[in-house]
Amino acid sequence: MGCAFLTCAFSANAQKKDSVNVLKEVSVKGYRTMNGIGHLLDLKDGVIYAGKKTEVIIVDSLDANKAINNTRQILGRIPGLNIVESESSGFTANGIATRGLDPNQSIEMNTRQNGYNISADVYGYNEAYFIPAMEAVKRIELVRGASSLQFGAQFGGMVNYITEDVPRNIPFQFVTSQTGGSFGLYNSFLSMGGNHKKLSYYAFLQKRNMDGYRANSQQSQLSGFGKIAYLPSNKLTISLEYSFLRNTIQMPGGLSDSLFDANPKASIRARNWLKSPWNIISNTISYKQNENTTYSFISTYLFSNRSLVWRNEDGGASVLDTINPATNQYIPREVESEDMHSLCTEGRMAVNYRIGKYKSTFSSGFRACHAWFKRLEDGEGTTGSDFNLSITGDWGTDLDFTTTNIAPFIENIFRLNDKLTITPGIRYEYLRSTVDGYITDSIKVYSNQGKDRSFVLSGIGIEFKPKGNVSIYGNISQSYRPIDYSQLSPFGVDAKIYPNMKDQYGFNSDLGCRGTLKNYFNFDASLFYLAYNNRIGDIIKTDSSTGNTYAYRTNIANSVHQGIETYAEFNILKYLNEHSKKGLSIFNAYSYIDARYTTGDFKGNRVAEAAKEIERAGIIYNDTRFSATFQVNYVGDAYGDASNVKVSTNPIAGYIPAYTVLDLSSTYRINNYSIKAGINNLMDKAYFTRRTDEYPGPGIIPAIGRSLYIGLTARF
């Protein structure tokens, strides 16, 4: 089986005695992959991917714990993917990153659903608090840094979660999935969809409750999605989508090294709570003028919030939250609230044309976005333990941010012959940011201060297909990351921020070879080089007048990330018999990442949170009814900050040890039913993936120990 997009058409004549029945032509389009992973077409939905490093994960083909969006099982075969596993400590959407970049809340990624952005603000506050329920996701598309030309300037690339399609030629279909598991997990998923004449619809609801791996980590979550599409003609499609999330999460806080070593399930915070209601409305218009010309427009409005009440980070992870004997009460908690609004429209056009006898493709488009963001912090909350956002007095921080972004782009596939393509592109970005309000701690007042900047991103990709399904690809594209809201806001009582920080810029490049051999071998191996200049980070400084240390946020250095990314999968039974209805595959996704600071006080040190080696390998068995996957996950060691110290009193600094985690997942199908079961972290490994100086910490955020799950799915 190949990893390319397959189009097949056939017609047939059937003759019986003297009559002839002519069957209608049938066109079938879909991804062919080996056990779930492939790569994107040169051109898809008006977007150019030629010459870029891409991956596609077919989610339904995976044995994975989708009820809790287990990221390492679902996305684990993406080489070099670093995952922050924070679902046990107050954040249900695990963060991801590639090539040694910052994985926290996927802040280095352009995170999308069905082609539109679902983070709060693509440049001002690019944090992903929401991803769709994996039980409703059909496939996941990921493009590395070269995606900056088509999607925007993020260093880490683009990840796009594609929800299930409306069932074709079915007036009504209903799916229910019920899953239970360790630590009080109960997940209920319901979906329905169908079509009638020119109208089609799809919707799902997911309700999940967990007591949590650690004490004080209960979660309640309701998420949903609805889509309705109208096809007035075979050329025009109009659709409307709505996504929402409602959750209440208790945050158990972070741990010091000694507390983690003594008991990784411990929690010394019982009064920390968060909610992050998320709402996204999207309207898509697609028009296919003819076989060579397509247009699409997507308009999205996001209106969301993040609010938390907590015993804040003052004093670090080991300071107990106890009752004051003098007052017989806890100290008042801190309350924070953020309101997020974003309105964005993206348009695309793709035109096929001929130069000589070969067809080339021109793609152009634009993005126009405006976002406004309200941040309220340092409100004095109650002395209670329940989820209560009321405050006494005024907010210590009251800031209003806006971001305006306008970005046109063009890109062109030049097909020089039937084997070689060259794809240059250019993108212009205009960005305006404003801030208005005050910060009491530093006695700072902003009076509608604004900053304008514009920049050009350019790049080029080359792809050569010497034979069959094998291609050699290379690309280089510029990247950019402006200063965002979180980097401008205070992060602790004694912390300071350099007032003249600069935006970050650099480039990504790839050189690789990928392909398939018949239906039993799939591979992708590449070299990469990423330059990241003016990197913003936190360093520890000493106040000369008091001798006290404090965290200082500034442009700390330039960095270079370079290494290799490889994926290989070999189906033993298909190799022995290509017509076998059974499969036995082994796969290996490996990356070596050398990410280091190249300037400044930390020159030669490893970039914070960048593991040198990440390897995920496994064995997959499948037949017509049963499938199972055993996966080994190894992530190398890393450091919490640029100093690379192994031990520190600062909660963000310190060593992040390497770890190996084993997972076993299985699925049994019979008719319209399937049973899924598995064990995550089979050996009950105690490990952590993150140190943090604030939310949801401070300190070490432990990952989940051994857990079991079992679920039943029915389709009617």
Image: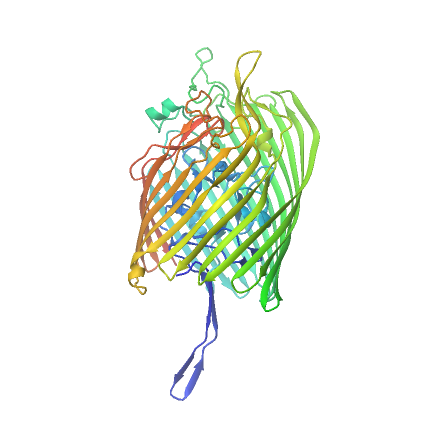
Spot the residue most to the bottom.
18
Q: Residue at x 57, y 21 (%)?
A: 392
Q: Tell which of 346 and 473 is nearer to you.
A: 473
Toward which corner of the image does residue 613 lie, by quadrant? top left
Residue 658, given in percent of the width and then of the height, sits at 37, 34
Q: How many labels sit on residues?
A: 0
Q: Quadrant of the C terminus?
A: bottom left
Q: Position of residue 502 (x, y in %)?
A: 63, 32
Viewer-nearest residue: 638 or 31:
638
Q: Quadrant of the N terminus?
A: bottom left
In this picture, residue 149 sits left or right of residue 312: right
Residue 55 shows in this picture: no
**In the depicted structure, whether residue 602 falls above or below residue 78:** above
Q: Quadrant of residue 501?
A: top right
Residue 401 rendering spot, x and y as whole percentages? 64, 34
Q: Can you say whether 327 is above or below 635 in the image? A: above
Residue 4 lies left or right of residue 576; in this view the side is right
> Closer to the camera, 642 or 709?
642
Q: What kind of colouring is applied to the model shown?
A: rainbow
Q: Nearer the viewer, residue 683 or 549?
A: 549
* Placement of 162 over or under 251, stated as above or below: below
Q: Position of residue 148 (x, y in %)?
A: 58, 46
Q: Residue at x 47, y 32 (%)?
A: 606
Q: Is residue 135 visible?
A: yes
- Is the residue 52 above or below the residue 70 in the image? below
